Image (cartoon, helix red, strand yellow):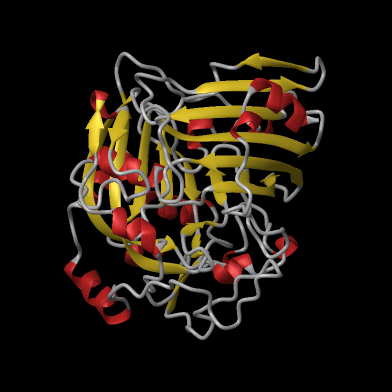
Amino acid sequence: MVNKYFLFIVLLFLSNPLFAEITDLHLQIGNKEPITSPIDSYDPNINSYPDPFKDDPILFVINKDNYLDYANDILTLGQIEMFENYPDSFKMNVYQSRRSCAVPEEVTKLTTENALLTDDGEGIEGIVGSIPFPNPSEALHHVWNHILRYRGVDIHGSSPFYIIDSDGSINFGKGEAIAKNYWNPFTRNEKGLQGMLMTKVTHPPRLADASLLVIESLNAFKKPRQAWVYNPGTRRVRRAPDIAYDYKPTANQGLTTTDQVDGFNGAKDRYEWSFLGKQKKLMPYNAYKFHEKELEKLLTPYHVNQDFLRYELVNVNVVKATLKKDKRHIIPNRMMYFDNDSHNMLVEETFDGNEQIMSYREFPIINFYDQPMCLSIHSATYDFDTKRYQLSNVRSIDIPKIQWRLEEPHDEAKFTPEGLKRFAR
C-alpha cells in the first residue's frame, strides 16, 4: 500500500485539470490589501477585534461528501485525515481570499535584502527588525522568517490552554508570560539575542514545571538556548538544558514538544530541511469570527467548532523536515506550511518513522491591526492516535488583550534565575 506521506509528495507535483476548473470558478488569490490601522468599529478598551470582513459570504463548504473532490489540489494531507477521522463533524467553510496582513512601517523600511545564514543555518546575521529573508530561496529562509516575524517588543499577557478528550471532557489550565523581543525596529539589539521569555502556569498550581525562563540567541551553534525552571515544591531554581527539541512539558500531556511551541522554535540541527515550493492551499485565515465567539461555544469533541473558522486559499511555502540518521527526535518527519505574506506557520503535520501521519496542527491568524501584525489566535494540535486535541496560546474576546508594546519596557534584570523566582511567586 502506498503510504499517505509518499502520496502527499506526489500530489504536490500533480494537478487535476478538471478540479482546476472548479477552483478557478470559486477561488482566486488577489492582490495584497494590508490593514495598517484599526478599523472604525475597533475599541482599544475592550478585548474585541471586530471582523473587517463580516459581510463576506461562505463560497462553499467542504465536508465528508465532497472532500475527495478537493483532495488532489487545495487540501493538505492533515486536512484529508481530519475528514477521514471525523466525517460527521469536520468541515471547512471556504471564503474569499483576503490578503490583509501588515507589519509596522518601520519593519518594511528596514527590509531591503536577505540576511546571511551562518553555521549551517543555526545562526543569522542581518538587519535587526527587518523581515530577514524578503527573497527566500531555501527551506531555512522560511523557518527563520517565521521565527523572526514581527510580534511586538516588550510583551505581557496571559492565556488559557485546554486539552479536550475524545468524550468531550475538558482539562483546563492557564498561564502568564512576559517577554522581551529583540528582533524589532524599536530597540537596539547588541546582545545577539532573539529574545527572553518567562512563563508560569497559574492554574492548576500543582504542575511541577510551572515556571520557566528562556534566553534565546540568534545562533544556537555558538550560544545554545539557556533555560531555568522554578520548582514550587522546593522553591528552587535549577538549570534546565533539556527544555528544547522533543522535551514534553507536563501541561501538554504528551501532545506537543517544546520545539512545537509557536509552530517551530529553537535549534534546527536534528533535521534535514527541504523546500517543496510555493503551493495554493486552504488555510485558517482572518479568523476574526472565531476570536469574537465565547470560548465555551468553541470547544467541541474531536476538534474546535468548525462553524466559526474561516478558510481561504493562501500562497504557502511548503517545507519538509526529515530527521537526520544520526539524530533522535520523537517526531521523525514534519511538514510545515508558511504564509507567503505574513511568514506565519499556518499548518504543521507530523509523521512517524513509517511516514504515517501522527498529528495535524492549525494556527489560525488575524491581523492585530492596532499594531499592525498578523499572529495566530491559538495553536490547535489534533492527535490521531488518542483522538484528543490541545488548544494553547489562546487569544479571544474572553481574555484580556496581550500587550505587545508596553509603555515602560521590561527591566532586563527580571530575566535572571533570581528574577524567575520572584516572577513565579
Image coordinates for residue 364, horizontal then vertical, percent: 50, 58
Image coordinates for residue 17, horizontal then vertical, percent: 17, 69
Image coordinates for residue 78, horizontal then vertical, percent: 42, 49
Q: Is residue 293 above or below residue 197?
A: below
Report the residue at 36% width, 26% height from top: 219
Q: Is residue 84 above or below residue 356?
A: below
**In front of the other: 160 or 326:** 160
Which image quadrant: the C terminus?
Answer: top right
Q: Is residue 320 above or below residue 298?
A: above
Dividing the picture into quadrants, the one containing residue 264 is top left
Query: How many numbered dots are placed on residues in this image?
Result: 0
Report the residue at 71% width, 22% height from top: 230
Report the residue at 53% width, 75% height from top: 38
Left or right: 95 as drawn, with respect to 210: left
**Res 307 seen here:** no
Which image quadrant: the N terminus?
Answer: top left
Left or right: 179 as drawn, with respect to 133: right
Image coordinates for residue 342, horizontal then vertical, percent: 37, 58
**In front of the other: 328 or 137:** 137
**In front of the other: 277 or 118:** 118
**Res 265 seen here:** yes
